[in-house]
Image (cartoon, grey):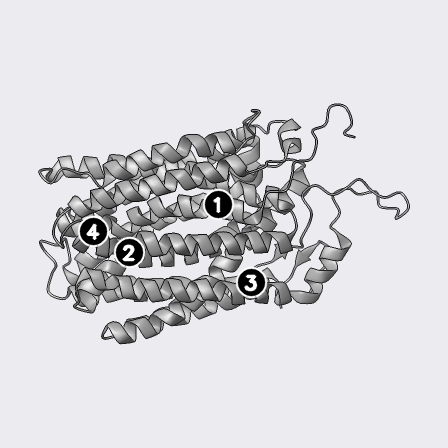
Amino acid sequence: MAHPGTASAPGRTPAWRYAIGMLGTSIPINMIKGSMILFYVDILGLDVRAYGAVMVVYAVIDAIDNPLLGHLSDRTRSRFGRRRPWLLVGAPMLVACMIAFFSAPTSLQGMGLLLWFAVFAILCEAFDSMLNANYGALLPELYPRERDRAVANGLRQGFQLVALVISLAATPLLTTSVFGTEDSTQGFQITAIIYGAVALVVIVFMALGARENPRYSTRERPPLLRSVWSIVRDRMFWTVGLTGACYGMAMAFVLSGIQLYVRYSLGLPVGNALYLQGIVILVSAGGLVVWTGVVARRGALWTWRLAFAVLAVSFAALFFATDLGTAIAAGVLVGAGWSGMLATNDLIVARVLDADAARNGEHREGLFLSAFGFFGRLNGIVTGLALTSLGVFFGYNSGDDPGTDPGLAFRVYLCVYPFVLTAIGAVAARFISVPLETPTDPPPPDPVAGSTDPSSPDPVAGAEESASSGPVDGSGVERPR
């Protein structure tokens, strides 16, 4: 029987019920990121310099609103929980903005086209941030132990890959052949409406089934400035965040450039991106099972480092592809490295969140994940500047002015830039240290065992991790081998 003033423990949320939410949150934003350059630059004729400028502004705005959204989520107190209200509000708003994003009138030109792109790109990213800050915050709360967390994360990444099959691999075919043509925009609008309906149903289904821990809502509401200052002083926030950003930025290049890589570098119709994207996603789906098994044996940190190295090598292989067959062969390696990062990157971040909760006695997953989202906002700046560089170095300014060698331009965009980023990340990961697995809400100390520190790590979990991942010291931090 619960003591007065305390909330009873919630029932367990089935891992699949939580994980399926990734299908809904991934479909809209991946269609947007995967098709925005093709739609606005190559078809509607938006100049890449204007595109790059918008992406810089959009990233700055998003870096500001992300911590605020996460903080508001942490402070929310309602009978529906902290995260679910934001998920139920954010889902229809994101869907509406995505449909508007791909409904730009073909008559728009110049400043009118630029403003339409800027407004709806920023709104889509803001509502996507609202969804993902809250959805991501549920992972460490619903599944405190890393073994359970790894299973739930593996399942949700599997659903993300299904979403990518829909939003990336199938989109070029649907927009250019089924509902539209290579040079029209009608197919994008119809596809966006269909994807939006699917995403809305899935997110609502997940949110209504998530059983948040009411104990987290009974604690003191953390003030914004003090919380932000505490996070920015955390060394692990910067080391893990910047290293993970190398992976995130590399995949942002892939999402935004693969259709134009197929068109210009391989000299094929955009619809052929279906086959290249499809093989990458299928390999990633199968690889999740393998990588999750490696995590169970060697730990998340060791596996994360290995996956980084594999991903870096894969981009080097993709650079030398000359046709669809060789590109697909390189794509197998890309899928292998990518699935390793999907299986491990969020586990590394969750360790940092666990350590923060244990150290400060406050569950600030929403704010902390939104602060980590700051590094994700670098994606927009970097991809915008990289696209602008194609105009400087190769003369590619838009679909109306592609320059003399757009094939080399997008080979550099899709392969060279991601290779440099992931190579840096692979080296940096070798020097990263993360906390041992620590339950976010340890049970009261056992007087027989003589434990007096309620925030001390679980000795069983600590022994398992130190044996599987790497040596540790007295600070409770896993050290690099």
Q: Earlier in the sequence, mark 4 or mark 2?
A: 2
Seen in the picture, residue 403 relative to 360 is either above or below; the reply is: below
* Circle number at residue 372: 1
Q: Nearer the viewer, residue 130 or 112?
A: 130
Q: Residues within 10 Å of mark 2 (few under 14, many from 20)?
A: many
Q: Does residue 401 appear to the left or right of 96 in the view shown?
A: left
Q: Residues within 10 Å of mark 3 (few under 14, many from 20)?
A: many
| C-alpha span from label 3 to label 1 | 23 Å
What residue is rendered at 42% in x and 41% in y?
Answer: 202
Q: Which residue is mark 4?
A: 175
Q: Nearer the viewer, residue 310 or 262?
A: 262
Q: Nearer the viewer, residue 144 or 111?
A: 144
What residue is rendered at 77% in x and 54% in y?
Answer: 459
| C-alpha span from label 1 to label 2 | 30 Å
Q: Residues within 10 Å of mark 1 (few under 14, many from 20)?
A: many
Q: Earlier in the sequence, mark 1 or mark 4?
A: 4
Amino acid at pointer 3: Thr
Foreground disc of the pair 3, 2? 2
SS at mark 1 in the image: helix
Q: Nearer the viewer, residue 178 or 360?
A: 178
Quarter containing the N terminus: top right
The answer to whether one can see residue 333 in this image is yes
* Residue 422, horizontal then vertical, whole percent: 41, 63
Q: Earlier in the sequence, mark 3 or mark 1?
A: 3
* Circle number at residue 292: 3
Q: Which residue is mark 2?
A: 170
